[in-house]
Amino acid sequence: MAFERIAVIGAGAWGCALANVITRAGRVVTLAARTPEGAAELARQRVSPRLPGIALDPRIEVATGPDLAARHHDAILLAVPAQSLRAAALVLGPSIARGTPVISCAKGIERGTRKFMTDVIAECLPLARPAVLSGPSFAADVARGLPTAVTLAFENSALENSALEDALDDGGDAAKLAAALGSASFRPYHTTDIRGVEIGGAAKNVLAIAAGIVTGRGLGASAAAALTTRGFAELFRFGKAFGARPETLTGLSGLGDLVLTCSSPQSRNFALGVELGKGAPIGATPIGATQSEPKLAEGAATAPVLVEMAQSKGVEMPIAEAVAAILAGRASIAEAIENLLTRPFRAEG
């Protein structure tokens, strides 16, 4: 499989950053904005308002989603918020060529359906081959060409059973697609564990809100370290229950992304938690995906879904439950902290 012509749908910070880095890797890239007006403005300015000061590579063609539906691309990246991914996939329509990789770059779970992003892609685009790109990365770093390592999960088409898949996980289509998107500064490590990569990206956003609350509340570095560590235990339990591989959960898209997101104000989820910890009202915090709201915190939409799914499998996630309760107004931050601190002592695990 050759992956030379790449489309990126979504001209926000992450979409523009990916378009830049993939172009620098030598691919022919088309970047699709949401509206004709947005595409025209981006084509004229060559600078995204979401990434001020970072120019769009002059080799990138700017278009709209409907424009892409009539063209052939060897792979398509959906760099849109999780709750908007279904609409973005549907824009591609039935014209997508059979076997085209469609890669989710979102980190979340769809509300209402409880579907992971690759499940949404499979439902909307049955001819496509769903994949997911995730890991510890900030758009500004990637756009500037700073060293970044992520995980790309993509099933190898020739594999017929999980045992063979495990044996060949270092080759096949997953490796070829990773090589096509990667460069000296952008390193996608490949795997066939799609579900594990999706779980890491979705769960860490919820836990990062909790980490931000700890910081905003001024609870100290020791509490922050404890929160991140116990949060990872929750992520790992959830992943295990839903079929993720342990090495994926302890890798870049799991533990790696959690550490980054729980420790940096560049993270929108962490920043949301900080504001909540400082006393900002729930109504003043961004939880929806809108064109006018650049500070989308994916974890806010994912929290209640993550908790529902965990409960359906009998998985204990007290930190995620606390975040969901705070965002829904069912508990104050003081009550949530007290509940966590008064849980029974137990063996670590």
Image (cartoon, helix red, strand yellow):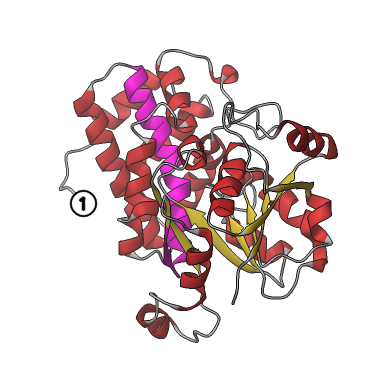
Name the residue at 27% across, 41% down: 230
Instruction: Examine the image and state in which quarter residue 12 appears.
Output: top right
Horizontally, is 333 left or right of 77 in the view? Answer: left
Residue 225 image point, x, y percent: 23, 33
**Is residue 67 shown left or right of residue 169?**
right
Name the residue: 77% across, 33% down. 44
Residue at (38, 24) in percent of width and height: 213
Number of marks present in the image shown: 1
- Find residue 39 and report its image quarter: top right
Q: Please indicate, yes or no, whether residue 131 appears anywhere in the rendered image.
A: yes
Confirm whether residue 316 shows in the render.
no
What's drawn in magenta, residue-wise? 188-217
Three-letter code, disc 1 = Gly
Relative side of 273 to 127, left or right: left
Q: Residues within 10 Å of mark 1 (few under 14, many from 20)?
A: few
Relative vertical location of residue 230 with respect to residue 8 in this rendering, above or below: above
Residue 26: image x %, image y %? 57, 58
The reply to whether the magenta stretch includes residue 209 is yes
Instruction: Report the front residue among 329 and 36.
Output: 36
Q: Position of residue 147 (x, y in %)?
A: 38, 45
Label 1 SS: loop
Reading the image, the residue beneath label 1 is 349
Q: Is residue 277 magenta?
A: no
